[in-house]
Each structure stands twice: as C-alpha cells, then as structure tokens.
Image (cartoon, grey):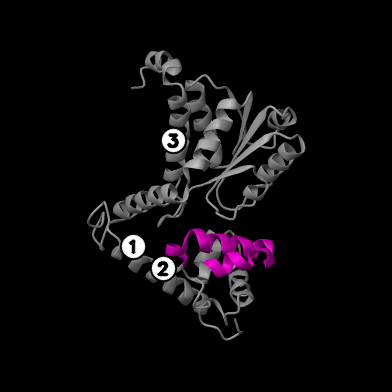
Amino acid sequence: MTKTATKSPQLKSLSDYIQERFDEFSRSQKDVARYIVDHLDEAAFLTAEELARRASTSSSTVVRFSQALGFEGYPELQQAAIEEYRSAAVSSSAAPSAGGAALFSFDHSELEGSLGADFSNIEETARNLTREQVDGAVAALAEAQRVVIVGVDQMAFFASYFRHMLSLLDIRAEIVASTGGESLQRLGRIDEETLVIVLSCGRAHPLLLRAMKLALHRRARTLAVSDASMSEVGEHAEQTLYFSSNSPSFARSNTALMALIQGLAHGLYARDEAAHKDRIRAYKLK
C-alpha cells in the first residue's frame, strides 16, 4: 500500500489488513485497531475525535495509525471502513434472513437504536462463538477445584453476577475487583487446580494482565471473556470467548456479555440437570 492509498487492497478488507499488520502498531495504535475491527459499523461514521474517545486514546494517535496503514490521513481510512461496512451490509441483505424485516424503521428513537444495537450484539456474538469454544469453557468450569473471576470497574458487576450464577449451581467462586489487599491475597492463592476467568471490556486493566500472567506462571487454567477479538488478555489465555459491545450510546453495550454468562451457566446446568434440579427448585427461580 502506498502513502497515497485511499483504501485497503482490493483482495483484503480494512479489517483483514489491520489484523495482518497488528503486531507492528504501538500500544495506543492497537487500541484504535481493536476498536475499528470490532466496531466497524460505528468506526465508519465517527470523527477522529469520537473514535479516539471510544478507543481511550488521542485524535493524533488515530491520525498516526491511519498513516501507519498507508493512508494520507483519517478521512481515507474512514472511507475504507465505510466501503467495508457497505459491502458487509449488501452481503447481509442478499442472504435470507430468519428475522424478516428490520427490527426498527430507519428513523428510530434513541431507545429503539439502543435495543437494535443490543439485538445485533447478541447475534454477532453467537455467530463468532464456536460450539467447541463454549463446550471447552463449560468443561473448564465444571472441572475446576477453585474459580477466581477478575473484573474491575464496570466488569466488577458482571464478575459478581457470574459468581452468583455459579453459586446457584453450588460452584463457589471468588472475585478480584481491585488492587486491594484482600483481592491480591486471592490472586496469591492461585494454583494448578484454579480456573482464572478474566472479564475485559476496552483496553485491558493492568490488574487483568497481572492476573493472567500469574495464572500462567502458576500453571492454572485460564479463560478470557473480552469484547476485543485481538484482546491483550486473550494473548495470554488458554481459552477466549468474544462478545460484541457495539452501542450508539456513551457507554459500551454489555447485553451480549450478560447473555454469554447466562449461557455458560446453562451449559453447566445441562451437564447434569438431575443433580441441580432440586437445588434450582428450592430457589424457586423457574
């Protein structure tokens, strides 16, 4: 690709080209790369400043990233993103759809736009997960002698919810949600019989990477759940599950993450439904 390129090579989409070059980028540029690849439908229509904010970096980094790919600037990269988005939209509309017409009209309200994005997130998450990945994660949960779930900031809530779902199936899990003494003590007890689960959204918090590297050093099993297909924590994880978090709002959507957690819990329940049936009935959950 030359310096005056206005789009990625014809035989490659922008996303494919970014993933091919991913290891060449700086850490901040990798944040931009991850966001574009996993949120193409947003990135295609965001200004450089808006993209920088959502990727937790600066607009100058977005421009430098565009130039590192061979574009003159961000407008040329954005045009390539628009072309890939349109191509994907045409392919999607040409394929038969089980859902029929669009969920909402074009001039939808903010609520409808948010619900529509969540609908798409669940569908994209389901399409990107394989049965082997999910079965592997469920087996790891079922076989673990000890489970430690690491999630900070907004992911702390989902770590707590995940622990709650596991407790209903009599699987005890511990949470690491901060760099406080008690949380670090839980990390310190990681051993070969521990399954370490890391929940990540956006740029990986240093604590998540610390937990994953410690788990590898202690030969513990590891599972990363992330909204980045090229996740930093995923690079160190034995298994990785991806969820889509596109959102028209000011915060990323976590609807698909919630569905994924419930799906894993259901997978555990289904492994031995008879053993769990009385316990679930006692909770009067269903």
Which mark, by number, is residue 263?
Answer: 3
- Does 11 appear above or below 58? below
x 42%, y 44%: residue: 255
- Does 113 appear above or below 286? below
Label count reads: 3
In the rendered structure, which disc, 1 or 2, sits on the residue that comes first in sequence? 2
Q: Amino acid at mark 1?
A: Ser
Q: Which residue is mark 1?
A: 92
Residue 35 is a magenta residue: yes
Q: Could you say where residue 270 lies in the image, as x and y percent from the top left? A: 43, 26
x 50%, y 65%: residue: 50
Q: Which residue is mark 2?
A: 85
Q: How would you rate the neighbour count of disc 1 (Cα within 10 Å): few for under 14, some for 14-19, many for 20 or more?
A: few
Q: Nearer the viewer, residue 41 or 277?
A: 277
Q: Which residues are magenta?
A: 16-43
Q: Could you say where residue 240 lies in the image, as x and y percent from the top left? A: 57, 45
Q: Amino acid at mark 3?
A: Gly
Is residue 266 found left or right of 77 in the rendered image?
A: left
x 45%, y 25%: residue: 269
In terms of secondary structure, where does tag 3 sit? Answer: helix
